[in-house]
Image (tube, grey):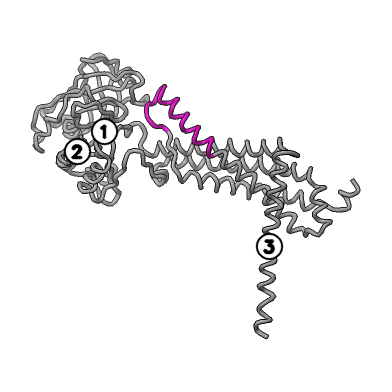
């Protein structure tokens, strides 16, 4: 008796699965026939609307990810970067300045001696006010580094105009000679009305400690238009001099450490030098950085909300119109024994297929859009990458499209539910 009692549920479950497979198969064949023959224009317009919305979402999210990745102040051609983790770094002013790496000068020198590493330089970012002899003080972002005479790019600017080495460091004494030179971005030079050879006074916290005088620097070069800087007023200086000016020589602090050379060798050297640091190989992007940057996160959230709203609105409208035109087919399904639930399932699956196809097309368009944005920006105002694409964008975009489809589906379902066999037959 127990075996006989257990058989019917198994048969019922099998019939249910078979019925759903049939419904999905029927819906797929109907959707394909309508997309290629009967209602080709309406299906194509719905897919195109979803695709364009998803493409815009991917491009804006890619720009937000690049923004969270550091912006122009971190644009460089290094092969490996070391940045501080929140829990394992030193900060010169706890709670005021962001986390920084410690002992960077000493550890960078050790990294440079490793096989496969061409060069390693700490990078310190500080804000200062520069003033020419006949101008007003202007705020400029100073980027401290250790140049080596090779053609490299830091913060979007070439480093070749700076004298190689960092003599002021003097093995940690900070008593060596100062180069007192800097390379200005085109924007910084324009604001300061400065050219190569001009002398500028520098003022910032801690810079007047030595001798009670305001230090000065000489413009070694002004970067060419289009070489970098992204329109930002920034300047490159020698690392140890900026550390002395800002007080970051205590602890040899820097915001990050850049390595050039073989990727594997540089990664190994970086991990050995800073086991608790975040090591990033060039070309890698971390989507989680979006959550740590307020502007980037807000941009991506706005893009998400706009994408869901626009996509859902268009899908609801067009699918509702399609279902309204398809009432006779729904009536035929009812007349041959399809219950209301099955007919509504056909409408819901059709809506899901449309949004899924649109999302896949949109991902392709979004990837092309990111390439185009980087190409246009690189040829005009911001050489380098201004938008990133990450593989996680694929499930993210598909998920957003499906959510929009879920938001949109009640309207076509309501239209389908009002369909009656007798009314459609009378028509």
- Comparing 376 with 203, the one in front is 376
Tell me if I can see residue 96 in this picture: no
179 versus 341 height, above or below: above
Residue denoted by label 2: 248
Front tag of 1 and 3: 3
Tags 1 and 2 touching, CB below 8 Å: yes
Secondary element under disc 1, as helix, strand or loop, is: strand
Tags 1 and 3 touching, CB below 8 Å: no
- Comparing 388 with 407, the one in front is 388
Residue 273 location in percent, x, y?
A: 20, 46
Residue 113 shown left or right of residue 371 in the figure: left
Secondary element under disc 3, as helix, strand or loop, is: helix
Residue denoted by label 3: 18
Residue 418 location in percent, x, y?
A: 80, 51
Q: CA distance from mark 1 to mark 3?
A: 67 Å
Magenta residues? 363-386
**Residue 4 position by quadrant:** bottom right
């Amino acid at each position: 008796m127990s075996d006989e009692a257990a058989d019917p549920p198994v048969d019922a479950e099998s019939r249910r699965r078979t019925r759903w497979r049939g419904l999905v198969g029927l819906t797929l064949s109907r959707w394909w026939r309508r997309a290629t023959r009967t209602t080709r224009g309406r299906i194509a317009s719905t897919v195109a609307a979803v695709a364009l919305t998803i493409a815009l979402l991917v491009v804006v999210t890619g720009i937000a990810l690049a923004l969270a990745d550091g912006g122009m102040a971190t644009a460089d051609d290094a092969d490996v970067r070391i940045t501080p983790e929140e829990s394992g770094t030193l900060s010169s002013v706890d709670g005021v300045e962001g986390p920084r790496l410690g002992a960077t000068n000493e550890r960078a020198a050790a990294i440079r001696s490793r096989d496969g590493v061409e060069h390693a330089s700490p990078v310190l970012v500080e804000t200062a006010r520069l003033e020419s002899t006949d101008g007003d003080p202007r705020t400029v972002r100073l980027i401290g580094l250790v140049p080596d005479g090779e053609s490299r790019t830091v913060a979007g600017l070439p480093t070749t105009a700076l004298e190689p080495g960092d003599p002021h460091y003097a093995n940690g004494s900070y008593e060596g000679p100062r180069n007192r030179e800097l390379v200005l971005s085109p924007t910084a030079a324009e604001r300061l009305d400065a050219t190569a050879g001009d002398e500028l006074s520098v003022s910032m916290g801690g810079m007047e400690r030595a001798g009670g005088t305001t230090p000065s620097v000489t413009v070694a070069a002004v970067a060419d238009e289009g070489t970098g800087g992204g329109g930002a007023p920034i300047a490159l200086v020698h690392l140890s001099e900026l550390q002395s000016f800002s007080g970051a020589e205590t602890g040899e602090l820097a915001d990050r450490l850049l390595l050039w050379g073989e990727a594997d060798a540089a990664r190994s050297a970086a991990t050995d030098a800073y086991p608790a640091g975040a090591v990033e190989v060039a070309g890698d992007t971390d989507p989680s950085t979006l959550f740590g940057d307020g502007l980037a996160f807000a941009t991506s959230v706005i893009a998400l909300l706009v994408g869901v709203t626009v996509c859902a609105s268009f899908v609801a409208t067009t699918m509702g119109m399609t279902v309204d035109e398809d009432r006779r087919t729904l009536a035929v399904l009812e007349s041959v024994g399809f219950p209301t639930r099955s007919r509504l399932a056909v409408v819901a699956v059709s809506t899901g297929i449309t949004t899924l196809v649109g999302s896949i097309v949109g991902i392709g368009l979004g990837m092309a859009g990111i390439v185009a944005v980087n190409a246009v920006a690189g040829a005009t105002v911001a050489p380098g990458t201004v938008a990133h694409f990450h593989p996680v964008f694929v499930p993210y975009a598909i998920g957003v499209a499906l959510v929009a489809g879920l938001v949109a589906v009640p309207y076509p379902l309501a239209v389908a539910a009002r369909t009656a066999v007798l009314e459609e037959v009378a028509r």
